[in-house]
Image (cartoon, grey):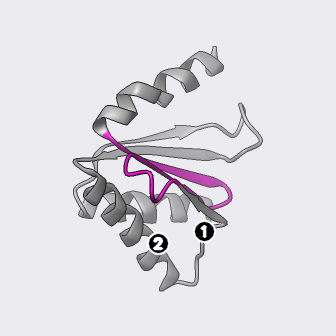
Amino acid sequence: MENELLNKIIKILDSKKAINIKTIDIKDRSSLADYMIITSGTSSTHIKSLADNVEEDLKKEEIYPNKIEGYNTNSWILMDYGDIIVNIFTEEERENYNLEELWEKINK
């Protein structure tokens, strides 16, 4: 189920022109989740649209997030789907937080 959900989320993000979608397998490094998806949007409007589309499309299949954080920050939205955490950033905030590099360091 989790790989199926992972693929669905990636497909939704890709269809809505998400930028540089990365998937990081964190199951051996964290108890938070099994996978983290990191992607960017071109603006605060675009990142909200990406989050809205993920939420709406998954709700049609009765898949609901445990939590959504940061929706009103205009720079970073986190969507918790249990074993999968989705991070949607503006490009500037993604560079600022640099989660990809952080998880690489944790892996070493």
Give the image location of residue 18, x and y in percent. Answer: 28, 52
The x, y position of residue 69, in whole percent, is 56, 56
Q: What residue is at 55 percent from the left and 44 percent from the top?
A: 36
Residue displayed at 39% across by 57% down: 10
Near-viewer residue (26 or 32) = 32
Q: Residues within 10 Å of mark 1 (few under 14, many from 20)?
A: some
Q: Does the magenta portion include 45?
A: no
Label disc, if present, on residue 108 of the rendered structure: none
Badge 2 local density, few (<14 within 10 Å), some, or many (20+)? some
Q: In this view, does 106 lie above or below 94?
A: above
Which region shows up in magenta? 70-90
User: Left or right: where does residue 66 sit relative to residue 71?
Assistant: right
Q: Mark 2 points at which residue?
A: 55
Element under label 1? loop
Quadrant into which the C terminus falls:
top right
In the figure, residue 21 lies in which quadrant? top left
Residue type at mark 1?
Pro
> Residue 65: which numbered mark, if any?
1
Query: Disc 2 versus disc 1: distance between alpha carbons?
Result: 7 Å
